[in-house]
Image (tube, helix red, strand yellow):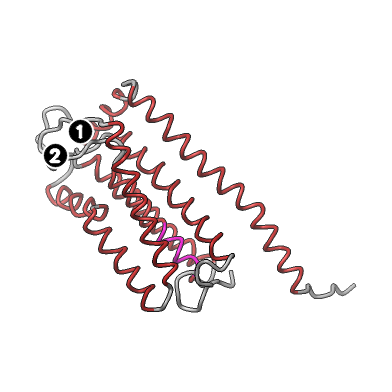
Amino acid sequence: MNQSPSSPRDGVMARLGKREIGLPVTLFCVAALILGFALLADEVMEGDTMGFDTRVARFFRPLGATGPIGPDWLHEMARDVTSLGSMVILCFVIVAVAGYLLLIRKRGAAALAVGTILGGTTISFGLKLLFNRPRPEIPGGIQVFTASFPSSHAMLSAVTYLTLGALMTRVAVGARLKAYFMGLAVFLTVLVGASRVYVGVHYATDVLAGWCVGSAWAVLCWVVALWLQRRGKVEQPGLGAVGAGSTA
């Protein structure tokens, strides 16, 4: 028996069903990340994570060593990688993205992108002031002047690169390209966070906390962006522009 072709209404209902399922799952992930941060912060403030943090730090920088493990070229590479999460680089990236969005007349999308990063920056420095954890006392580390918990590099790289990765999945056609962009965003986020521990300016738990908060904020902002888009508050997807739909 031949099956009748599906109607456009069936396609719409299928997409609505996916949205109804996807939103609670997404919000659950956000809640889990925030809960993870809260539990981690409680353990850090009670000093229960120092043993773990010390073991990780000593793995990268054994007792008596004048620097981290590995050859000199690896040390320099780590310093270059860690700069990918610096305010200077991230500001340049977001200004470039916002400029592109403005040029293609996506003012709402540009405002959301900038607002996501500014909001993440405010949260990051607010949490640093709240917890005021001292930096690791490791000789030969990069000189820094802010508190340690959570790691701003880890958090803001998660916010920036995961947001850009999500934006690119909206223009990418096909599951392989979508997976590539999100995989690249996750890879950069993990690489920046790991480099902070390697160069000796953060405890491992600082980085884990930064990843939790940054990922939660990026996902939450993305949910808000999609919600505003569906209500016409943000420009609808367009071919070749951020937010464009795909056939995948």
The reply, left or right, for residue 64 in relation to residue 102 is: left
Residue 15: image location, x then y, percent: 67, 63
Residue type at numbered disc 2: Gly
Please identify the dominant SS of the magenta region: helix
Classify 226 as above or below 7.
above
- For image coordinates 52% across by 66% down, the residue present is 233
Q: CA distance from mark 2 to mark 1?
A: 10 Å
Give the tally of numbered discs: 2
Judging by the rendered image, the residue that carries numbered circle 2 is: 141
Q: Is residue 22 above or below residue 4?
A: above
The residue segment tinted magenta is 163-170
The N terminus lies in quadrant: bottom right
Extreme residue in the front direction? 233
Q: Check contact, mark 2 vs mark 1: CB within 8 A.
A: yes
**Residue shown at 20%/39% (left/top)?**
146
Q: Position of residue 199 (x, y in %)?
A: 19, 42
* Label 2 secondary element: loop
Residue type at tag 1? Arg
> Nearer the N terminus, badge 2 or badge 1?
1
Identify the disc placed on residue 169: none
Q: Residue at x 44, y 59 (%)?
A: 182
The circle on residue 135 is: 1
Does 163 sit left or right of 82 as displayed?
A: right
Q: Secondary structure at mark 1?
A: loop
Q: Residues within 10 Å of mark 2 (few under 14, many from 20)?
A: some
Please check the rendered image and state whether residue 164 is part of the magenta-colored stretch, yes or no.
yes
Q: Residue at x 46, y 78 (%)?
A: 240
Question: Residue 28 is drawn in which quadrant?
Answer: top right
In the image, taking residue 104 as reference, residue 63 lies left or right, namely left
